[in-house]
Image (spheres, grey):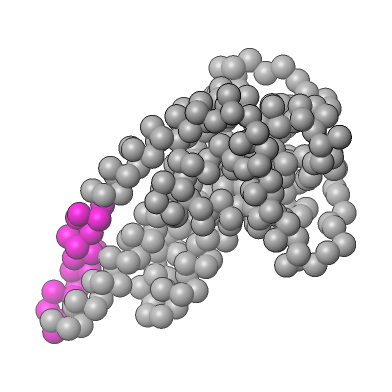
Amino acid sequence: MDVPRLAAPVTGPAGRFLAGAGLLVRGLGLYVRSPGLMLLGIVPALISGVLFVAAFATLLYFVDELAALITPFADDWSTGGRSLLRVIAGLAIVGLAGLLAVLTFTAVTLTIGDPFYEKISERVEDRLGGAPGAVEVPFWASLRRSLVDSLRLVAISVLVGVPLFAAGFIPVVGQTVVPVIGAAVGGWFLALELVGAPFYRRGMGLPERRSLLRADRPTALGFGVAVFVCFLIPLGAVLVMPAAVAGATLLARRSLGQPIEES
């Protein structure tokens, strides 16, 4: 399928980044105006949240042992040097785990809550005039394609995360620059993941949505980074996930040149 190339908005990258972040706020507004969907939207994220909190708590409990395991060469160092290196290693492990947790949380939650989030996205589209060119996709076919695309995105994010993990060992840079890069990378993959439903509704898969979001990358990054930061807040992922789905529908419509204002 040929993907239309849309001209980027006149505003500069910073303005488009902020506009992308604003789509999450607007998604929240659209979502809370549908009380019947609110509880259903939170349930899948709550299930995933419990699983991921338990896994992350286990990681934190064993992080000292893991840091020692990956730095055996420091066993003969002085106590101060060894402790400093392993604190940095522990921070790098937690940082990488956090990045991967945010991305895999989205994939798992979208899979668990596919019918609920599809309904939220559909309700948003109906408010904005519907989805031109919508196609009927059987539930199991949609779920299978969504799962395959999610696995592909997670695999790519792991490949990107490994160098970031290594860079986390660099003093100062690893604790300042690397988290910013991690948020940008995580935000991009979150945006790609979350816009899946409205693109599938139009018969378009991962290559098309990647191409369209890339045409206005600052807007996609603004939305994705805003979601990423919210997901780092305790319980943020559970509460924000449904609104992120609604905001992603706005992002998809904007990338396709379709109205995002209610008539």
Quadrant housing residue 134: top right
Residue 201: x and y in percent read: 71, 26
Residue 124 left/right relative to 70: right
Q: Is residue 35 visible?
A: yes
115 sits left or right of 55 in the view: right
Place of residue 12 in the rendered image (x, y in percent of width and height, measured from the top left): 80, 67
Identify the image quadrant of the C terminus.
top right
- Up/down of 7 relative to 195, above or below: below
Q: Going 13% across and 84% down the picture, which residue do you hit? A: 78
Residue 206 in view: no
Q: Quadrant of residue 123?
A: top right
In the image, the segment drawn in magenta is 59-78
As drawn, is 181 to the left or to the right of 64?
A: right
Side of 191 relative to 258 (left or right): left
Observer-nearest residue: 220 or 4?
220
Position above or below: 113 against 72: above
Residue 141 is one of the magenta-drawn residues: no
The location of residue 100, given as percent across then percent down, is 43, 50
113 lies above or below 69: above
Q: Main secondary structure of the magenta part?
A: helix
- Which residue sits at x=52%, y=68%? 180
Q: Residue at x 53, y 40 (%)?
A: 241
Q: Is residue 214 above or below residue 182?
A: above
* Residue found at x 83% / y 29%: 129
Quadrant for the N terminus in the image: top right
